[in-house]
Image: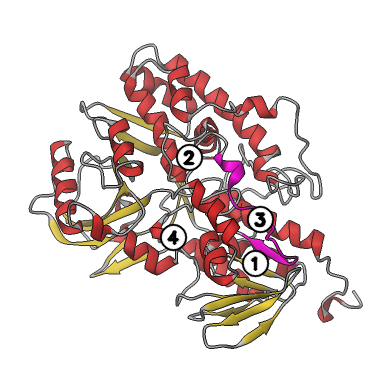
Amino acid sequence: MIVVGGGVGGMVAALLLARDGHDVRIYERLPRLGGKLAEHRRDGFTFSIGPSLLTLPGLFLDLGLPLDLVELDELCRYRFADGSTLSTCRDPDRTAEAVDRLAPGEGRNWRAFHRWAERCLDASTRTFFAGPPSGPVVEPPFRLAGRRPGERPAGPAGGRPSGALPRPRLGDLLAVAPGRTLHALAGRFFRDARLRQYVDRYATYAGSNPYRAPAALGCVPAIEHGDGGWYVRGGLPRLADALAAALDKAGVEIRLETEIAEVVADGERVGGVRTILGELVRADVVIVNADAASLYGRLLPDRARLRRIARLGLSSSAFLMLAAVEGRTEGLPHHSVVFSADYRREFGDIFHRRRPPEDPTVYIGCPAVTDATQAPAGAESWSMLVNVPAGDPGRWPTPPEAYAELVLDRLARRGHDLSGRLRFLDLLTPADLRDRYGTWGGAIYGGAYGDPFAPFRRPGNRGPRRGLYLVGGSAHPGGGLPLVAMGGRIVAALVRRDFPRSRPRPEEAGR
């Protein structure tokens, strides 16, 4: 079987299927595996240009990966436009106390919000995270709350015996607040506008607009406070390195710098792939770990499916500013979010006016706070991310270099003045992400969650031909490290059902 694309979802599916005894080959266009789990290095500085926080680490530890994990006591520090701050940590009680300090009386409401998030997550693990939206559950629940990384898992689902499938409950649908937006959910729990903005922030985890995205995205705090937020020492791309080593040990053949031009198929089933150099490689199973729009627009053209994807609308993209900062910043946490003054206007800029926000919210990742290997002594590497519309930055009203100056000016006004401290500043735009990863317009998560029911309209994990499967951020269940890992598990389970291995590997014969 063939995996087209070596992102994390494809790597997980390939590893599980190879361990089942299938012969698996991965074709990756880039010179390394890991997809968006990548980094940028220059002059002794290392910058994350993809995920910078690991949640649900058991999804990877259960694969036997030797990860050197560091738990972050402070998950994130939020700075609001009025100068006030909110620090969240794994312990829900401490977070509730921090909420009370920010807005007296709201700590009780945050506890109620967190309890709702836990119920929503429980329902999601029994349904949405356990299988394709159009079919039965195929995998055990993925929630691993209560187990710290390093503890021995009790089974492949982190505590549930192997083979035991989740059982959806009658109340699961109501538990995810169907038909309600994330912003409406925030208004249900909080009076303080700053706390509503904090909840709205979770829509950006799916590249979406909180004023239209489903309330179910509010389950994220249950993940962060249940299993914590973790850093992989040496940078999160070491997770991709560990997966690559596991693939090699499992006998998966890796073809780097090899682009696939076509998924070969007739009207009923796949027959393999054709490389850009014209080589035909036969296979009964093809797992596409590429943007779904790229699959149906180029690899296996299908106008009807491409139109359905287009109707979802594109998720946001990212404007990345990679700053080599002289000196150390006192009190700076590993993760910060500096909020804009008008969130509704910001998302209107991104999704309606299709321009970079005039007053952007800025995410700051500074791994040197936790890991001295990420910057030279006496310096820091800052990865700053602004959510911007997917598409060509050549159409922006402000060139990227000038927009970077605007962002630095906004940060300076809100307590993060880098004047005179920059050794260099490297930029990555949506065009760079598009060209690097082949995503439509540089959209990070494929289609946006443009209404409360959009998650159920994302491309499914089974394709329109027998033997064709989709995995990755643009397919079910969505983007982000935990979700693409879940997608990899779902696809592996579907392949097991559809193509059971009938003969053992030669080394297994006679055991």
- Between the residue at mark 1 and the residue at mark 4, the CA separation in whole angstroms equals 19 Å
Find the distance from the CA under tag 3 to the CA under tag 4: 19 Å
Q: What amino acid type is highlighted by mark number 3? A: Asn
Of label 3 and label 4, which has the lower sequence position? Answer: 4
Marks 2 and 3 sit apart, C-alpha to C-alpha, by 20 Å
Tell me the crowding category of disc 2: few under 14, some 14 to 19, or many 20 or more residues within 10 angstroms, Cα based. Answer: many
Q: Name the residue under label 2.
A: 450
Question: Which of 67 and 279 lies nearest the eye of the viewer?
Answer: 279
Q: What residue type is labelled 1?
A: Ile
Gap in angstroms between the C-alphas marked 2 and 4: 17 Å
Q: Give the range drawn in magenta.
A: 454-470
State the mark number for residue 440: 4
Say which quarter of the image contains residue 401: bottom left
Tell me, yes or no, whether the two marked residues, 1 and 4, touch with CB atoms within 8 Å: no
Q: Which is more N-terminal, label 4 or label 1?
A: 1
Give the residue pinned by disc 3: 461
62 is higher (above) or lower (below) than 116: below
Kind of element beneath mark 3:
loop
For badge 2, the amino acid type reads Gly
Q: Name the residue under label 1.
A: 287
Quadrant location of the N terminus? Answer: bottom right
Question: Of tags 3 and 4, which is closer to the observer?
Answer: 4
Can residue 466 be seen?
Answer: yes
Q: Nearer the viewer, mark 2 or mark 1?
A: 2
Q: 274 or 196: nearer the eye?
A: 274
